Image (spheres, rainbow, N blue to C red):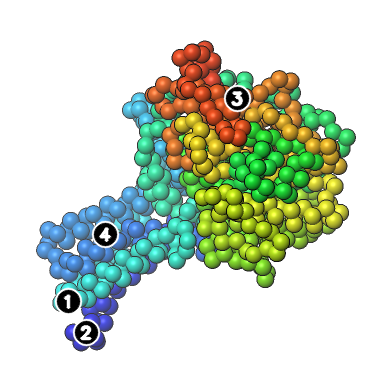
Amino acid sequence: MDSKVLRQNLAALLQPYAGMLGAWVLAFVFFRLVLVIATWGFHGDATSGLMLRSFLYGLRFDFAMATLLLAPFALWRVWRPEMARAERRVFLGLFAIVALFTLFTLTSEVEYYKEFQVRLGPLVLEYFGKPEDNRTVIGMIWHGYPVVRWTLFCVLVWAGFLWLIRRIVRRDTAGTTWPARLIATIVLAAFTAIVSRGGIQRTPLRWGDAYFSQNTYANHMAGNGAYLMMVTLRNHKKSSLSNDWRRSLPATNAVAIAREITLLPGDTLYDAAKYPLLRRSPANAVPLPRRPRHVVVVMMESFSARFCGATGAKFGATPNYDELARHGVLFDRAFSISTHTAQGVFGTLCSFPNLPEFDGIMKHPLGNQPFRSLPAVLEEKGFTNVFLYNGHFSWDNKEGFFRQQGVHHYVGRSDYVNPTFIDPDWGVSDFDVFMRALEEFDGLAKTDKPFLGLILTLSNHAPFNLPKVEGLEPITEGGAQNKRLNGVHYADWAVGQFMQRARTKAWFNDTLFVFVGDHGFGIPPVLTRAGLLHQHVPLLFYAPSILGDTGEVRHVTASQLDILPSIVGIMGVDGLHQSFGRNLFALPPGDPGHAYVKGSGSSIAGYIEGNEILTVLPNKPAMLQTIDLGFPPSASEDQAAEKPQRAAEMERRLKALIVTGLNALKEHRAGVE
């Protein structure tokens, strides 16, 4: 075929698509403008320049949604260049229906945002359920909002939209050849795949990509209501697991039990009728001669207690961490809330459990709410903060999520100047992260504000592409675990370099350091059906000039959920928080401690109290076991039948935490601005 003819054929096939795409994007921009005008009272300190950026960021969502809407119609037109009258009517009718539903969604969002100050999402679906509830909701909408006015507006815009693009939609492409149609199909498929995921990038477009500034309103306006609603519907009721859990215990009972096992003496509930655990803890709960001014939280990739000398391992992989533990307060029976980094970071900084069906909460639409995170609580007390990481913060929607949780400054893969080592997959080395952290902390310490430093390491991760370090001898006695051991060994070396330099800083003696593994890793044996060794991590609080220099190992059961309230307690801060954990330094005498665990992607949840663990799968018998975390570790046979009262008590506590968490999450009560 003549190349000129081929190009003409391609142009004839793709021009209508380009016209429809442009029309849809303009429609989305128009509705964003309508939304801004109608809700401008919520703009806060957003400037016109910031709102312009909001519109520009929003184009990613607009183009993504437009390509998804047009894909089936574009392919229809490519392969049916000439339609009979009946087929044309079907085509136009379906296009008109899709357009009406989309524009109606955007129209309804105006009053929705006025009411809830959030874009369309899971909360919409929470209002509908039983037929009688639906009638109530529909009646409330009809009587409480200008339904007729907005319906007329929607119909008018819809009619105008169809009239403007009628010629493009109807245009025939008769005479085009099958090679041209095949090439056009490939072009359309590739374009749709790229644009619908937000461009050529590692991760697909997520709601967190709209969070580009510190102004929540501007961030909200950068979204696209139709896109967010589509994502919500796509994720809605993929499984009924969370609903099964919610039915396992009445909500009021769940809250009462959750409060019983979580609240400590002196804790004061705030708006108890609405929020399950929102409270203030007494500022003097941890008696200390003086309080730290700054806080540094180091979340270490795959830093398992099973390979850590301070918690009993004999490999010699963690001499620096072990030395810190000899001068700090170590909890050797601590557990991550789950088995992936995203959940570990979430649990550590938000003190909220990893719930069934919500392993990816930072990417899930329901994660788009203000948790009472550690950065948010401390920010209200005048703290600045910085979050440092080896790789891209877009991974797991970290930046998008934590911008809403009060983190303002990020140092990620592209922000390091002349790093000593770069892994092509994961980014710079832990050493580079720690050295940059020292620079950042020096700068923050020069201000008149206390700071919160957050460090997430990554070098101890497969494929363990580690930099060569002079004098750091490889460990060879671990057999199949040698790579993992050397990853831990390098991570420990980097911590040693960091702390060695930190001790020379003026801010060191005024700083509380907290070191915790984001999770462990799967190593034999599989301890209980929760795979407990995967979540056994060391937890260390280190501030020799404040907590004491003699060192202490505490054997109470601890959790990442306990880190936030413990830090708040040590700092002497009476900030409002909704932790699902407790202040480990204020536990009543004899309290064995407890922890909640649920592996990523697993339906099995576990509740640990002292040396006992109860694991539950919805609608299945619970299993109670006694555990020994020594070397080697062990677990007893199921003791639920022998100890029915104990099993029932622990099962109620486990279900109470899950049901309370699920209800708070789904009803947008996980936190409060």
- CB of mark 4 within 8 Å of CB of mark 1? no
Residue underneath mark 4: 72
Task: Residue 292 in the image: state x and y as whole percent.
Answer: 82, 42
Q: CA distance from mark 4 to mark 1?
A: 20 Å
Between residues 324 and 12, which one lies in front from this camera angle? 324
Residue underneath mark 1: 177
Mark before the other along the chain sequence, 4 or 3: 4
Q: CA distance from mark 2 to mark 4?
A: 26 Å
Residue underneath mark 3: 611
Which class describes the residues within 10 Å of circle 3: few (<14), some (14-19), or many (20+)?
some
- CB of mark 1 within 8 Å of CB of mark 2? yes
Task: Residue 647 in the image: state x and y as whole percent.
Answer: 51, 17
Asked whether residue 213 appears in the rendered view, the answer is: no
Give the quadrant of the C terminus.
Answer: top right
Q: Residue at x 36, y 40 (%)?
A: 238
Viewed as shown, does residue 39 lie left or right of 571? left
Tell me the tag on residue 508: none
Q: Residue at x 31, y 68 (%)?
A: 188
**Amino acid type of disc 2?**
Val
Viewed as shown, does residue 65 lie left or right of 115? left
Secondary structure category for the residue under label 2: helix
Q: Residue at x 60, y 25 (%)?
A: 611
Secondary structure category for the residue under label 1: loop
Secondary structure category for the residue under label 3: loop
- CB of mark 4 within 8 Å of CB of mark 3? no
Q: CA distance from mark 3 to mark 2?
A: 77 Å
- CB of mark 3 within 8 Å of CB of mark 2? no
Placement of 154 over or under 411, stated as above or below? above
